[in-house]
Image (tube, rainbow, N blue to C red):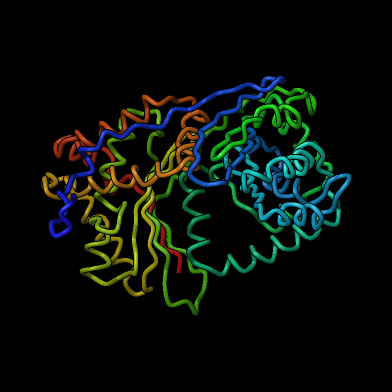
Amino acid sequence: MINRSQAPAIKDAVNFDIQLKPLEKFQLDNGIPVYVVRSSEQETLQLELVFPAGTWYESENLVASATNFLMKNGTSKHSALEINEMTEYYGAYLNRNCFHENATYTLHCLSRHITDLLPTLQEVIQDPAFPEQELAIFTQNMKQKLAVNLQKSEFVANRHIDKYLFGEFHPYGRVSSMMAYDALQTESLHGFYKQHYTYNNCKIFLAGNLPDNIIPLLNQYFGHKWGTETHNLRPEMPILPADEKKYRIFNDENGVQGSIRVARPFPNRYHPDFPKMLVLNTIFGGYFGSRLMSNIREEKGYTYGIHSQIYNFRQAGAINIQSEAGRDVCEKAIAEIYLEMNRLRDEPIPEEELSLVRNFMIGSILGDLDGAFQVIQRWKNLILNDLDENYFYNNIRTIKTISAEELQQMARLYLVPEDFYELIVI
């Protein structure tokens, strides 16, 4: 019998042998790959269809996101209201997202209702009508949302820093505008849909408690050749970062706080320094106990929160430090950011701090693998970026074994204040 009066021994997260749950792969009759992670813990499932239909592939601004959004807002048989009612009747949720490279449609539902919901999902994916009225409503709503957001310093800061990093005409730096929404036409949406949402451009990711006949069901609704077969080459687009490095934008004369962005380009996930920088970035500003939080929030009280993140886009990456602070202390906060960069470059990281960060990162990964839905997301990121499980395990090894000397070398390479774009929007 367990002695409840004694606390169990504490085990460091770094001592866990983390294993990525294996993936099953099937192929529908038309060649669509289906990636599966099974789980019997709950009577739910997640079905996600992924297409190379992100903003990277659009020739007109906002066409990719508008096409993705409006596919669900009416088919030749049902209106947007009827489609929503058909999914909500079963307590299901059909979500869509458009990213830089890919666009997705994701269905969450109880496992026993998948047979009833697949006809609706098939209709949304294979028979969107793009009604003029729905486009008009979408345009009006998005313009109103944009008008409100443009009054917010953080929204303006995010738009500008991406433009400085990648160039205003690059998909990573391009932003929405009133004119771009007004220019949207249903013909453009139809054309983009026919080019990118075809059977040979589709990948399916499936997770959860799956019925035994799930593959025959998917074959029934998605295993035939729908749409005209297309072959979309990913166009090469040059990154044209801004020449000037320091910017101050006055957006709201009555505002009481400013938005700080300090960012620089950085190699993407295919570069050998990327997993090392994930560790350094966590120490610098990647979690609540980071250097930036301890200094600028806890000690100086300039902000409620500050964090640093690494963009891991397909073509390029970036390091971006973000915070909102009082207008009178924004310049001081930036000075402290550079101070912490210099500390990491000049002083080795203490072993106690490094051990804490190792445990935090490994613990976060353990949490991210808690359940089939989370595991399939890990696999999806690997597959869509032409990587395999070796990449995952290499990152784990880096977290567990990287030394303070290697991290200091990374800081000397990449945390150089002169290399960063600096922006304050007030």
**Residue 76 spot, x, y in % from top left:** 88, 44
Give the residue furthest to the bottom: 254
**Residue 422 spot, x, y in % from top left:** 38, 55
407 or 102, which lies in front? 102
Q: In percent of the image, x 23 and y 43: which residue is there?
A: 13
70 or 172, which lies in front? 70
Q: Quadrant of the C terminus?
A: bottom left
Residue 217 located left or right of residue 374: right
Give the residue furthest to the front: 1
Q: In percent of the image, x 66 and y 24: which residue is there?
A: 32
Q: In percent of the image, x 22 and y 62: which residue is there?
A: 294
Give the residue furthest to the right: 77
**Residue 27 spot, x, y in % from top left:** 63, 21
**Residue 378 spot, x, y in % from top left:** 45, 36
Tally the marks: 0
Residue 138 located left or right of residue 382: right
Residue 326 located left or right of residue 46: left
Q: In percent of the image, x 62 and y 31: which residue is there?
A: 212
399 or 321, which lies in front? 399
Image position of 325 with respect to 408: above or below: below
Residue 32 located left or right of residue 226: left
386 or 167, which lies in front? 386
Image position of 145 with respect to 341: above or below: below
